[in-house]
Structures are given as C-alpha cells and as structure tokens.
Image (spheres, rainbow, N blue to C red):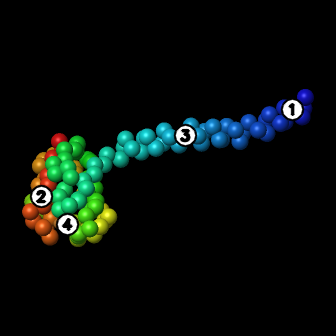
Amino acid sequence: MTNRNMWVGGLAMPVMAMLLLFAGSPSVRAADQRSAATAEVKIDNFSFGPQTITVPVGVTVTWTNRDDIPHTVVSTDGVFKSKVRDTDEKFSYTFTKAGTYPYFCSVHPKMTGKVVVQ
Ligand SMILES: [Cu+2]
C-alpha cells in the first residue's frame, strides 16, 4: 500500500499542472481578445476598406497595406499621420476621443476614409 500511495502522490502534481495548462490557455486567449479593443482597416486596390469604420472610444485602429503600391494614412485634421506604408506594413492609432476622423492617402489624395469614434 505504501508503494501505491507514493505512485499516486508522485503523479498528482504533474497531472494537475497539465490540466491547469490545458484549461488555462484558451481562457487567457479569450480574455486577450476582449481587452485588446482593436479594429482593422485594409488598404487594397487604391481604397480603404471599410471606408467608414465606427469604433468605441479607446479602440486602436490598425491599417494594413495589402496593395502592391505604397500608401499613407493621414488625418485630414492633422490628428495622425503615417509614414509611407509598403506592402504588408501597418499603421496603428488609438482613438481616445469621440468624433469623426476623416483621412486620406497623401500619395493618392483621392483615396479617403473615415473613422467614427463613439
Ligand atoms: Cu495611396
């Protein structure tokens, strides 16, 4: 009986640790997604998509250039201004105040978009 108890006791710790690992990782990932508060805008074929995006205050909007041409993301009112973004490069800005933020691409000023922060 002593041997059996030792066996169970020796196994209990690693098994507990493994259970915690498996149980812990998915919930941690879900919590990260909730607290991240991000929104995505894709730049492709000379346009911002979605052209108008509505987000709550505090959200970080990330623009990703999916075009094979360099673009920029420049606030019409001077609130934010990206460098020239090549293919697959990103630009992020966190909106901390409610309002409407029109923007354009300074390389191609006909490319326009809008972020509405509520
Ligand atoms: Cu452009």
Q: Secondary structure at mark 3?
A: helix
Which numbered circle lies on residue 112? 2
**Mark 2 vs mark 1, CA separation in Å:** 72 Å
Pointers 1 and 4 in contact (CB under 8 A)?
no
Pointer 4 or 3: first along the chain: 3
Q: Is mark 2 within 8 Å of ligand 1?
A: no
Pointer 2 or 3: first along the chain: 3
**Mark 4 vs mark 2, CA separation in Å:** 11 Å
Q: Amino acid at mark 1?
A: Arg
On the image, numbered disc 1 is attached to which residue? 4
Q: Amino acid at mark 2?
A: Thr
Which numbered circle lies on residue 86? none
Q: Is mark 3 within 8 Å of ligand 1?
A: no
Q: Secondary structure at mark 4?
A: loop
On the image, numbered disc 4 is attached to which residue? 72
**Circle 1 or circle 4, nearest the eye:** 4
Pointer 4 or 2: first along the chain: 4
On the image, numbered disc 3 is attached to which residue? 24
Pointers 2 and 3 in contact (CB under 8 A)?
no
Residue visible at 70% across and 38% down? Answer: 15
Pointer 2 or 1: first along the chain: 1
Pointer 1 or 3: first along the chain: 1
**Circle 2 or circle 3, nearest the eye:** 2
Above or below — where is 15 with respect to 83?
above
Q: Amino acid at mark 4?
A: Thr
**Mark 2 vs mark 3, CA separation in Å:** 43 Å
**Ligand 1 found in image quarter:** bottom left
Pointers 2 and 1 in contact (CB under 8 A)?
no
